[in-house]
Image: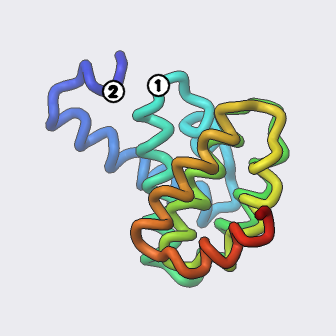
Amino acid sequence: MPFYDLPKPERDKLVSEIHRKIRDDISNDDRKNILLYFSDEDTYIRKSAYLAIGRIWLSNKLLRKKIIDLLSDLYLESNEKIRQTVINSAGEIGIYNFVTVEHFFDTALFDTHHIVRNAVIGSMKKMGEKNPVPLLEWARKYL
């Protein structure tokens, strides 16, 4: 059932479940649930997943390296939805620490699929609203 066809309490429960399963995957060096959510056809499931990555990165310093390593591995997947969600996840992290995720944007800016390139644009917009200085410095490389 599509995300927004669920009643609000069920959506909230699903978001909590996605967050928990993603955190558990990261902690246990697993990817099963992350791959499932990152590749979901429903854009709101993918959004819940990348928001969970951002929240986990922000709240758990011990998992930060694992998260970046995981995103680096996932960006190599052939599924464009997974790569798109990686970039959106990197954008959530980039709001607080752009330098950590800059390399994702250097690559994704020239991705073969338009939804990944569009994710770069969306992430740039979000990061630019919250933390514009490092983003502007990065963008100067491409002028």
Indicate the amino acid at tag 1: Asp
Task: Report x, y in % for residue 23.
Answer: 51, 60
**Mark 2 or mark 1, earlier in chain:** 2
User: Which quarter of the picture shows residue 55?
Assistant: bottom left
- Frontmost residue, 17 versus 119: 119
The answer to whether 93 is drawn above or below residue 2 in the figure is below
Q: Secondary structure at mark 1?
A: loop
Q: Work out whether residue 24 can be spotted.
A: no
- Frontmost residue, 110 versus 28: 110
Q: Residue at x 33, y 26 (%)?
A: 3
Q: Which residue is mark 1?
A: 42
Task: Report x, y in % for residue 123.
Answer: 54, 54
- Frontmost residue, 62 versus 24: 62
Indicate the amino acid at tag 2: Phe
Q: Work out whether residue 111 can be spotted.
A: yes
Q: Residue at x 62, y 39 (%)?
A: 118
The answer to whether 122 is drawn above or below residue 23 in the figure is above
Quarter of the rendering occupied by the C terminus = bottom right
- CB of mark 2 within 8 Å of CB of mark 1? yes
Q: Residue at x 59, y 55 (%)?
A: 25
Query: Residue 3: which disc?
Result: 2
Task: Report x, y in % for residue 97.
Answer: 57, 79
Quarter of the rendering occupied by the N terminus = top left
Query: Residue 61: which disc?
Result: none
